[in-house]
Amino acid sequence: VSAILMGMTLTSCDETTEMIGGSLIDNVDKLVVDADTFNVSSKSILAKDIIARSAQGYLGSMRDKESDLTVTANFMTQFHVLSNYEIPEEDKITSRDANNQIIADSCEIKLYYSKFYGDSLSQMKLTTYELSKPIEEGNIYYADFDPKTKGYVRSDGIKVKQTYTLSDQTTPDSIRLSKNFSPAITINLNRSYTDKEGKSYNNYGTYLMRKYFENTKSFRNPYLFLHDICPGFYFEITNGIGAIAKINAAQINIFFKYKNGETSKSVNTNLISTEEVLQMTNFDVSTTRLQQLASESDHTYLKTPVGLFTELTLPIDNIKAKHENQDVNSAK
């Protein structure tokens, strides 16, 4: 009889595990999970105070099909010099004027771009301005910063107007289709130039060359170069629509001849823009059209970096009132 009772006891044990874990936790430590829904309001607002990036630039103008906005990108750049910058010795330079003074045969600025948006055949009109003073580092500049309206453009300095296309049909196909070709917008600076002291030169390259031999140190110190020689240039789109180029680098090329042994060679020295100096894009967008879009109430817009943002208002007070002693774990 004892053996039978023992067998019955063993087979009647409860082997379920559903309470393991929960049975070890005190009731005050158990989580109570609720789900709730709240209304979130949204509206479009004008994007203001967007800090301008200083290591890349854009140049051109396009109409956005979605919003019917015309966005124009104007570009400012400064140029960097290295501590070992040099050009051939003055007495070896054979490019001379009638008074036997050294001259540059020609001078140009090239704006190299890696990508573009729109149609490369769109004809654009560009005006290049010389700055009267450098735009200083250490300050915060925004994407609507305009050097012209802020007084940085030299009123009697370089002002070159020209048209261009990104496809640059003036360059032979044999060059444009080569692997080493880097597309660029070219601005010629071959007109006569007068500096801030009233001295005249046959072109801007001659000005730079003669300044180099007057004080070589100014071409080997970025601060001195910006403040004493070349504060930078501003490139403004004045007409045309259909293409915007992403500018990788700006470069000043100076062409001249010098005597190398018994032969005379044509050479080029250049100054380039780098991340050590400022490069900024000024985005010009129609605020009237932006305001019209922002006032539409059935939906909201995102058009960045300069344009429209969507602002969401969360009903924090309502959430707290219903769930005063709870934490929000996630929200979708």
Image (cartoon, rainbow, N blue to C red):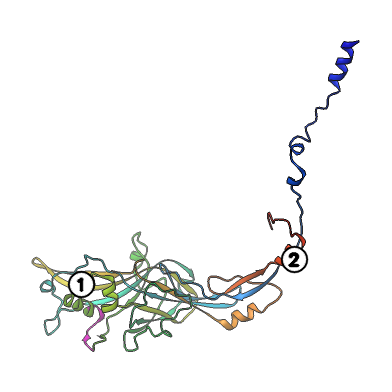
- Residue at position x 44%, y 73% in the image: 140
In the image, what residue occupies the spot 44% across and 78% down?
124
Residue at the far left: name it.
262
Q: Is the C terminus in the top left, top right, bottom left or bottom right quadrant?
A: bottom right
* Of the pair 149 and 105, the residue shown nearer to us: 149
Tell me the SS state at disc 1.
Answer: helix
User: Which of 170 and 262 lies nearest the eye of the viewer?
Assistant: 262
Q: How many marks?
A: 2
Rendering quarter of residue 98: bottom left
Which residue in the rendered view is the most extreme toward the right?
A: 1
**Viewer-closest of 188 and 79:** 79
Circle number at residue 318:
2
Answer whether labels 2 and 1 touch (C-beta < 8 Å): no
The image's mark for residue 217 is 1
Estimate the x, y position of residue 39 in percent, counting from the top left. Answer: 74, 66
198 horizontally vs 139: left or right:
left
Q: Quick check: 178 above or below 225?
A: above
Front disc: 2 or 1 = 2
Where the N terminus falls, by quadrant?
top right
Residue at 47% x, 80% y: name it: 240
Horizontal and vertical percent position of residue 250: 35, 70
Residue at screen point 33% across, 65% down: 175
Dot 2 surroundings within 10 Å: few (below 14), some, or many (20 or more)?
A: few
Number of the label disc, if any, that sits on residue 165: none
Badge 1 crowding class, 10 Å Cα cut-off, few under 14, some 14 to 19, many 20 or more, is some
Magenta stretch: includes residue 174: no
Name the amino acid, label 2: Asn
Q: What residue span does the magenta drawing correspond to?
A: 198-205
What amino acid type should be assigned to the residue bearing mark 1? Lys
Q: Is 325 situated above or below 258?
A: above
**Which of marks 1 and 2 precedes in the sequence?**
1
Q: In which quarter of the image is residue 331?
A: bottom right
